[in-house]
Amino acid sequence: MRKIAYVFMLMLFAASCSQDKGNYDYVDLKEPVISGLQDQSVLTFSTLNIVPDLGDGDFGTGEYSFEWKVIDRNSVADPIVIGTERNLQYEVVLPPGSYALYFTVTDVGSGIYWQKEVSLTVSSSMSEGWMVLCSENGLARLDMVSVVTGETMTDVLRASGMPHMKGPRKIQWLSDKTDASSPFYLLTDDGATRLGKDAFEWKPEYDFSYEVAVQDKLTPHSIVSAGFGKMIVSGTDAHYCEIMGIDGLYGSAVNKGFAVAPYVGANVLATQIYAAVYMLYDIDGRRLVAYCPLLATNDLGGLDPVAGMDEMGQIAEGMAPGAGVLGTAFDRWPEGMDFVYMENTRYDPGNAKMGLTYVLLSDGPSCHLYGVQLGDILRYADCTYVLGKGYYGDLSQCSDILDEEALYAFSSLKNYMYYAVYDTVYRVDLSASPVREEVQFTLRGEKITCLKFNLYQKTENLQKSYDLVVGSVKNGKGTLRVYDGRVSDGDFSEVEPVVYDGFAEIVDAAYKERIY
């Protein structure tokens, strides 16, 4: 019976097929060959004009429809339609960023469509350039040197609605350790705030108080990050913020019973650190101390996370014999001297992925420089050591190096130190013996107010981290100079700087790299 039923079904199928006379409507479609589209780079509020070439034939509206849409490459937002005509004429109101731009031609009758994709980069005049923090009558003023348009914009925070803040200290970018929508920090005596990524836009919730879990108002001198945390010093207290998978808050002071200098040492070279070791200077006990927050966890024995350098070295050796302390540049950790200055660099003697943190100390008229390397207590990733004794030098013979108005900067290119006294910049070759200063240049009639190396974050800009940045003031007017350090190999005496002017007294400068 199954076989009979099967044969009967085949007969029915054959009969139905025999009645199919092939009654279909075949239409010859005119197929557009889309060309003439190229990658686009535009400024916000400019007009984007594109006239595509569709090849031979008439592709008029009615038979064909057209659509232009963009998709943000760095978000999951829905596509945005920016045009429905064959030729695009669009006033750009998109936020600065990197987009995919799609042009689609659709045959209205059949629904068949053809599509072409190109890249669209939207920039604002403030997408890239120098952020120049000035003091104007004691108030913070942020100017911007745009490399997009070539213009210098004055007081870019004026229309942001941000309250006036006194005592400007620092402008810095902490993009990989903070909300991506507001990665820039303005630090002042009045407090700190984040600033938006596009045009330094401001909201009340950007105020630093929203990042703090204690009652006291914190006014950081700088923000230093390493591994899964970041640290600040406010007044003479250090505060830590955990960011391991969470948006943590700064807690109570980590230094108990002693005051610390307004600097934090950390490894700013390694990209992967799990249990970072930070360094502070105890100005009461006049000694260096280490801080490793992970030591307090049960996994590592619930130890005191704050320890003297010797003690931290012993803890490190106990956890990994032979891998605790690297280098023998000095026998004993410094004690009994007055703190002068501290700076983190990417200079890495020994290729241990542990950048040198330089600590400048004084003992009366004597001046001593220590280079300390800070690593990872677990040594899981980049760092194979926990601490390093990377450098020692007696700088007592360098003239005016302890002048109360001296400014200091350390290169990540070589073992070079620079300092400025009033209008003159000196270089110290720390590898020489004896260690002496040599004049780099003098800015006649100007007072140097900012001396630094900007540590760039993007791979394509890393070599510019060797450029010396100098801010100066004369008769209340500020000038920013950038000396190329790649070709000069750290000798700036014959380098002709790039000069920017039109500022008030310059307090700090940092380069805003494109973040899309």
Image (cartoon, rainbow, N blue to C red):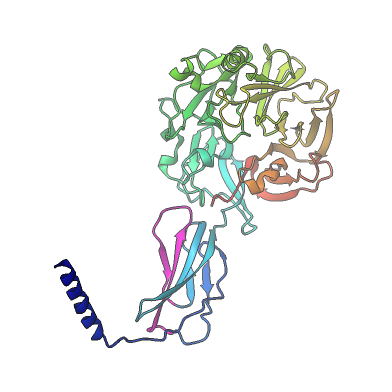
Q: Quadrant of residue 124?
A: bottom right
Q: How many badges with numbers are in the image? A: 0
Residue at image position (33%, 87%) is 25
Decide: is 227 above or below 42: above
Asked if residue 283 shows in the view, the reply is no
Is residue 62 on the magenta stretch?
yes
Percent position (x, y) of residue 393? 77, 21
Residue at image position (44%, 35%) is 245
Percent position (x, y) of residue 421? 76, 32
Residue 274 or residue 497, whichever sits in front:
274
Residue 366 or residue 25, whichever sits in front:
25
Percent position (x, y) of residue 314? 60, 12
Horizontal placement of 449 versus 77: left or right? right
As drawn, the residue found furthest toward the left would be: 1
Asked if residue 437 shows in the view, the reply is yes
Is residue 377 on the magenta stretch?
no
Decide: is 91 above or below 27: above
Residue 72 or residue 500, whichever sits in front:
72
Q: Quadrant of residue 367?
A: top right
Q: Which residues are magenta?
A: 60-85
Q: Quadrant of residue 493?
A: top right
Percent position (x, y) of residue 251? 44, 25
Q: Quadrant of the N terminus?
A: bottom left
Decide: is 39 above or below 86: above
Horizontal placement of 434 versus 411: left or right? right
